């Protein structure tokens, strides 16, 4: 608003112009910074330069209207890749470090929908929002963005996290999940106030069961549909530094290689693609993002000549640039609690 006001815009026009610029910059960040980190960059480039080929694509299936939709293959499988990226503890700020620690359960506790704001709580108290003695966030829980993003990538070595405890990167995208995700608080899945069989707290169980409930296509079926080579049986069974399927019986191994649950499939695929989604998972995610951006009221897909103006140059606007812009590039605003 401040920048655009300098150009003479006021009132509703100023607000509309600011909103459009925020949306475009955000979309640029998704396309050039976020997506290539989680999807094979060659797939992202292909989708964004040559267009979609499978999902609400021109000339394919039912004609699509103004409003983008989200296919089940995206929500029930491919985009659940995020579950493998979660850590069991975070360097959150000066006070809550992994030695301190900012555990995943603490992150749950400090939210209204999955916790009770009480730092000492464990399950089953976390299931009840009223079980804690406090009802506000502690003042020392303000995020230190220097620990959560790598500002050295944006030429700001002065904003590197203090070396003693460092920062956090997401876990590699693979078929391994951290243990706290086997025991989710009820609020994370809308289960508050009901009896929950223990297995239903397990996120991997939920993902796999959900796919069964909606009769989701399997990995091999999707590979066929997308016209890409499927992973081999050996790749499915052994993976690359991912989850072990050794304990399965021969019959179970035969079943899982014949029709691999799509979520497991895309994570296995990532193990063979440098920790990024590959031909099946990556194509689904890139096309759905492309469609969502295309259908947005303000859209860099429909305005291909648009370039960012609030980053370091006319091609660059990353998440770190967004944070630098919002916090005026100042360490004490990105990190109010200090080192
Ligand atoms: C601590 C962090 C997270 C927790 C505890 C969590 C938990 C959950 C739970 C409980 C569900 C519902 C499962 C079901 O009943 O089917 C779910 C769904 C989902 N999650 Fe997560 N999740 C987390 C982070 C993420 C991240 C980082 C991503 C993606 C980058 C992600 C993507 C999704 C998607 C796409 C769905 C399906 C939504 C739908 O079908 O409408 N989640 N998650």
Image (cartoon, rainbow, N blue to C red):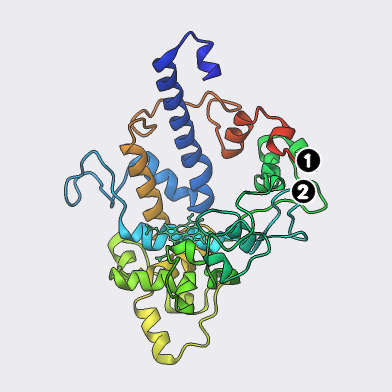
Picture quarter with ligand 1: bottom left
Compared to 277, does 209 lie above or below? below
Residue under label 1, please give it.
338
Compared to 105, does 256 lie above or below? below
**Is residue 173 among the parts visible in the rendering?**
no
Camera-side residue: 228 or 322? Answer: 322
Place residue 225 in its image quadrant: bottom left
Where residue 62 appears, as percent x and y from the top left, is 16, 50
Residue under label 2, please give it.
94
Camera-side residue: 102 or 8? Answer: 102
Place residue 300 in its image quadrant: top left
C-alpha separation, residue under disc 1 versus residue under disc 2: 7 Å
- Can you name the residue that lies furthest to the right here? 164
Position of the C terminus, as image quadrant, is: top right
Where residue 261 appears, as percent x and y from the top left, is 38, 72
Q: Secondary structure at mark 2?
A: loop
**Mark on residue 8?**
none
Would you call the spot at circle 2 few (<14 residues within 10 Å), some (14-19), or many (20 or more)?
A: many
């Amino acid at each position: 608003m401040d920048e655009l006001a300098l150009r003479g815009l006021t009132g509703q026009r100023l607000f509309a112009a600011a909103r459009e610029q925020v949306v475009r910059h955000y979309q640029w960040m998704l396309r050039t910074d976020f997506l290539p980190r989680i999807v094979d960059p060659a797939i992202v480039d292909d989708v964004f330069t040559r267009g979609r080929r499978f999902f609400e694509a021109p000339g394919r299936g039912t004609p699509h209207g103004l409003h983008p939709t989200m296919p089940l293959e995206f929500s029930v499988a491919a985009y659940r890749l995020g579950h493998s990226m979660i850590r069991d503890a975070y360097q959150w700020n000066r006070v809550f470090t992994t030695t301190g620690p900012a555990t995943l359960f603490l992150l749950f506790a400090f939210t209204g929908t999955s916790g009770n704001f009480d730092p000492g709580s464990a399950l089953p108290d976390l299931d009840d929002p009223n079980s804690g003695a406090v009802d506000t966030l502690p003042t020392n829980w303000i995020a230190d963005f220097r620990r959560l993003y790598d500002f050295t990538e944006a030429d700001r070595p002065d904003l590197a996290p203090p070396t003693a405890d460092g920062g956090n990167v997401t876990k590699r995208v693979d078929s391994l999940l951290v243990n706290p995700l086997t025991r989710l608080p009820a609020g994370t899945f809308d289960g508050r106030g009901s009896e929950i069989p223990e297995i239903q707290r397990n996120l991997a169980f939920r993902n796999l069961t959900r796919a069964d409930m909606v009769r989701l296509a399997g990995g091999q079926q999707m590979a066929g549909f997308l016209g890409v080579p499927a992973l081999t049986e050996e790749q499915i069974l052994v993976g690359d530094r991912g989850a072990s399927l050794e304990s399965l019986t021969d019959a179970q191994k035969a079943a899982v290689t014949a029709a691999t649950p799509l979520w497991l499939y895309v994570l296995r695929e990532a193990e063979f693609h440098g920790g990024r989604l590959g031909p099946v998972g990556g194509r689904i995610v890139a096309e759905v993002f492309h469609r969502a951006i295309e259908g947005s009221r303000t859209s860099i897909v429909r305005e291909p000549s648009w370039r960012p103006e609030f980053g370091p140059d006319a091609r660059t606007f990353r998440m770190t640039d967004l944070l630098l812009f919002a916090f005026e590039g100042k360490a004490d605003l990105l990190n109010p609690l200090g080192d």
